[in-house]
């Protein structure tokens, strides 16, 4: 009997607690989602600000071997020509997944970087967010990025080589993946006319029926 | 004990970190910068205040056999509130405190005060106790963080105070720096205690001496 009474007391307390938290979560969840969306959007805008074009509001999605790559195109404001790309690179560092928003010009040179999230060692790995580290990437070709320890030209943060390497390698990899995706999309766009016609005809037929 | 002494005991006499050696995990982990120390201190004050208050209110209805799980549920609820609110309204602080916000649940200061104080005292005294202990915790954290941030980064609350030529001592920012700083602070607190005890003793001896003289004079 006491067992049941104790159980019911605990159940009552946990029910009140979880009910309260559920209510609060209803309030904060949309705000948290909005905060994260804004953070990512401002990061996207910041990394391509030097290109001066406009960022596509919709992302391009490319699936390769089951891996989804999501990137944004930067277009010239007048000619609508693609002048750059933005994507989020990520790779595990010393103690967390380091996510970096990367901006590239059309030749895949780095034009801007911003660390979006990381939980590296405070005072060491977290210094990857500082301009002193990130600015040395600017203007460099993404294909040859490496830290000096691996024979590259990026000076790693003192006592945080693993974090520095994670950022550097993730940028190089995401650039390669975007390049693959862009080439694949171009191949589709330049595909034989037959396919293109089919794509146009199908909706028309549907309308007819 | 008076209300005032319930409040002030948390600072020096029963300082949770430096005297009771409770809550060392966050004290060591987030004391690398003063800003983080203040953020963690504020979170702990809130959780401590609310859990002490609720525990004190429900203390008569809680069966003693399951009081610990009930206290933990109460504490975890308020920690989750802090986590959600901080994530929504202060994302920068949330990012820098990271995993240590949810870990407030297992901060033994909070359960310790619920068990040792709030479950035996009225809500008013429990609030006073929570404020004193919470501020004492923050005070200790800020002290450790001040030493570590100045030596390890040359700054205090993000403001550059060491000359540019100063080469920061990396060790102080890393975990060992926290242990070293804490060791010295504990030694300092113990030393202060010893001096106080000695003074007390000297005063007692002096008093006794005067009494003896008075007696001697009386005898003459």
Image (cartoon, rainbow, N blue to C red):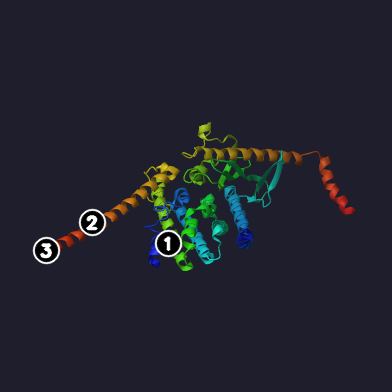
Residue where numbered disc 3 is placed: B219
Residue where numbered disc 1 is placed: B132
Q: Chain of mark 1?
A: B
Q: Earlier in the sequence, mark 2 or mark 3?
A: 2
Q: Secondary structure at mark 2?
A: helix
- Which one is in front, A177 or B196? B196
Q: Earlier in the sequence, mark 1 or mark 3?
A: 1
State left or right for residue A140 relative to residue B128: right
Q: Chain of mark 3?
A: B
Same chain? Circles 2 and 3: yes
The Cα atoms of the two marked residues, 1 and 2, are separated by: 31 Å
> Does residue A68 show up?
yes
Name the quadrant containing residue A26: bottom right
- Tell me residue A189's x, y (percent): 76, 42
Q: Chain of mark 2?
A: B
Of labels 1 and 3, the one closer to you: 3
Q: Is residue B30 above or below residue B47?
A: above
Residue A91: assigned label: none
Residue where numbered disc 2 is placed: B202
Of labels 2 and 3, the one closer to you: 3
């Amino acid at each position: 009997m006491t067992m049941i009474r104790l159980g019911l007391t605990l159940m009552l307390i946990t029910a009140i607690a979880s009910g309260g938290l559920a209510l609060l979560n209803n309030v904060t969840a949309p705000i948290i989602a909005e905060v994260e969306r804004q953070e990512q959007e401002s990061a996207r805008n910041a990394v391509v600000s030097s290109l001066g074009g406009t960022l596509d509001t919709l992302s391009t999605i490319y699936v390769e071997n089951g891996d989804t790559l999501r990137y944004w195109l930067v277009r010239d404001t007048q000619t609508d020509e693609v002048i750059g790309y933005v994507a989020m690179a990520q790779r595990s560092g010393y103690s967390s997944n380091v996510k970096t928003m990367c901006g590239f010009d059309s030749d895949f040179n780095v034009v801007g970087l911003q660390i979006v999230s990381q939980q590296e060692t405070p005072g060491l790995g977290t210094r990857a967010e500082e301009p002193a580290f990130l600015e040395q990437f600017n203007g460099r070709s993404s294909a040859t990025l490496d830290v000096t320890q691996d024979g590259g030209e990026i000076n790693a943060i003192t006592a945080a080589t693993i974090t520095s390497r994670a950022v550097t390698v993730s940028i190089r990899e995401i650039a390669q993946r975007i390049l693959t995706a862009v080439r694949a999309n171009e191949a589709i766009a330049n595909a034989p006319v037959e396919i293109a016609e089919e794509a146009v005809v199908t909706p028309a037929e549907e309308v007819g029926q | 004990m008076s209300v005032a002494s319930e409040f002030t005991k948390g600072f020096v006499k029963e300082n949770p970190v430096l005297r009771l050696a409770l809550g060392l995990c966050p004290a060591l982990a987030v004391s690398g910068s003063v800003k983080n120390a203040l953020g963690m201190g504020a979170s702990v004050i809130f959780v401590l205040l609310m859990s002490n208050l609720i525990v004190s209110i429900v203390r008569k209805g809680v069966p003693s056999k399951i009081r610990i799980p009930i206290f933990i549920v109460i504490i975890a609820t308020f920690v989750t509130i802090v986590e959600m609110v901080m994530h929504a309204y202060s994302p920068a602080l949330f990012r820098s405190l990271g995993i240590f916000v949810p870990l407030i649940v297992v901060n033994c200061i909070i359960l310790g005060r619920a068990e040792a104080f709030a479950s035996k005292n009225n809500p008013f005294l429990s609030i006073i106790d929570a404020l004193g202990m919470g501020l004492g915790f923050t005070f200790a954290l800020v002290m450790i963080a001040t030493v570590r941030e100045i030596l390890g980064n040359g700054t205090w609350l993000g403001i550059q105070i060491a000359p540019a030529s100063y080469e920061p001592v990396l060790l102080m920012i890393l975990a060992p720096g926290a242990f070293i700083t804490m060791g010295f602070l504990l030694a300092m607190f113990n030393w202060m205690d010893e001096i106080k005890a000695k003074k007390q003793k000297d005063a007692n001896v002096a008093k006794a001496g005067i009494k003896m003289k008075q007696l001697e004079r009386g005898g003459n």
